[in-house]
Amino acid sequence: MDQKMKNFDRGIEQMMNESAVAPPFGMWNRISAQLDAEVAVAAKPAASPVPQRSLTGMVIGALIIGASLVTAYVVNSTDNNNNRPSAITATAPVVVAPAIATPVTTPAISQQQPVLVSEVKPTAIRSSKPKTIAKPVEEKVTIAEETASVSATHYANDIDLLIPVMPVSANTATNDTYFFPAVDSYTGEGNKTENKAIAKVVKTEKAVEREVTTSSEPRIKFRPKKHNKHSYGKINRTSYRKR
Amino acid sequence: MSSIVFQGNTEEQIRQGCAQGDRRFQEMLYNMFSAKMFAVCLRYANEYNSAQDLLQEGFVKVFKNIEKFRGEGSFEGWVRRIFVNTAIEHYRKQVNLYALHDSEARGYEYYEENALETLKQEDIMRMIQKLSDGYRTVFNLYVVEGFSHKEIGDMMGISEGTSKSQLARARYLLQKMITESGAVTGYSQNG
């Protein structure tokens, strides 16, 4: 039975392999047209996966970023060069030649005039971070004890010190702090009066310790209540109770 | 290797011309193989128009891949294989194959050995076209192209047993059609 099957298969195989059927007319034109179409598609440049608008936007964005970077660099470099003395000494003479050569005997005017360029200092533009307003801090300023002892000789040479007007007879040493011996204008310094007065100026300022608070308002402390609630002041409920 | 001369050009010259995209050589190649390949397409297709589509698609593939032919084996066999693969790809998605029991496939047995001698090629081809896509494809691949069941299973993505059962069913239906056509009276139902 298997042999019969094989014979059947072999008979069909021979018939099919020997078979040839002419294709319909115009089949080659269809194939040729499809080949032309595929060649045309292959010749087209590959479309960019990114749309044209997106590309344009990206280019514009890149230009803007580049321009801002260049500007920042220029500003920064100008800021750095601000301390340097500017070496702009443009003394190029401007030669103004007469435009019209006239036969007048007057000599041609050739102006050679140095151009004065005033030095312009560029203003530095500094970017600063926004300052954060800190909480007012209590400052404790302690003024140290200042003690100044000035000897009498020092005051004697000081012309600004006032000399009390007093008679010569009263030229005695006292306990006055601002005592100065009277000077006889006729006898001068040759007075035998022994001046033992020594002016002692002792300026003493005791240390003052005070608190300086920058905040203008007095501090109000809110103390939490027991039940984790804050007190915002007392409410007068007397009138309410009377009702 | 090949001594085929077509319109004064050897097969190698035609291949080279086709590889360069010369339309004249492509037309020569078409004229050389179109009749044989159209018969192949008719066997794998279920209708005439589908066979034309397969023929067009197959020749476009041949022209696009002709430089890949390395001269191993006959050029006609290479072209034929391209057309068979094109037909398999075309019907692979449509074919819904399922395995059959042997008892179903062995319902008819063939008695008359000379049955095919009385039939024409066109008649056999028409009967093959009447088979469903799966039966027709497996029958063509096994009987005409000479592939084994394992190769058919790999190509079509089915198991070897499914290929065997599909072939048996195809044979049964083909013999039945031959019997019903009245050309052969040597069939008898067994069981």
Image (cartoon, coloured by chain):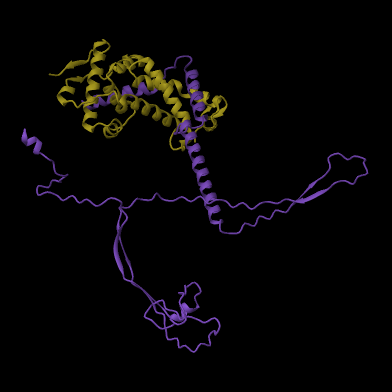
Chain colours: A purple, B yellow
Q: Determine the residue positioned at 42% across, 32% down.
A: B78
Quadrant of the image occupied by residue B92: top left
Q: Quadrant of residue A83?
A: bottom right
Residue lying at 51% horizontally and 74% vertically, measured from the top left: A159
Can the viewer see residue B35?
A: yes
From the viewer's perspective, tell me whether residue A61 is left or right of residue B96: right
Which residue is more in the foreground, A140 or A65? A140
Q: Is residue B36 visible?
A: no
- Could you tell me residue B151's position as x and y percent? 29, 34
Could you say where residue B60 lies in the image, as x and y percent from the top left? 45, 26
Q: Residue at x 15, y 46 (%)?
A: A231
Q: Is residue A99 left or right of residue B52?
A: right
Measured as percent of width and height from the top left, residue A115 is found at 72, 50
Toward the bottom, the furthest residue is A192
Determine the image quadrant of residue A242. top left
Percent position of residue B44, x then y:
34, 22
Q: Residue at x 27, y 26 (%)?
A: A6
Q: Eyeballing the image, is A197 above or below B153?
A: below
Q: Nearer the viewer, residue B71 or A207?
A: A207
Q: Compared to A104, does A199 lie above or below?
A: below
Task: Give the side of residue A14 with respect to residue A50, left or right.
Answer: left
- Depth check: give the residue in front, B128 or A182: A182
In the drawing, does residue B130 fall left or right of residue A120?
left
Instruction: Please tell me whether residue B128 is drawn above or below residue A84 in the rendered image.
Output: above
What quarter of the picture does the N terminus of chain A occupy?
top left
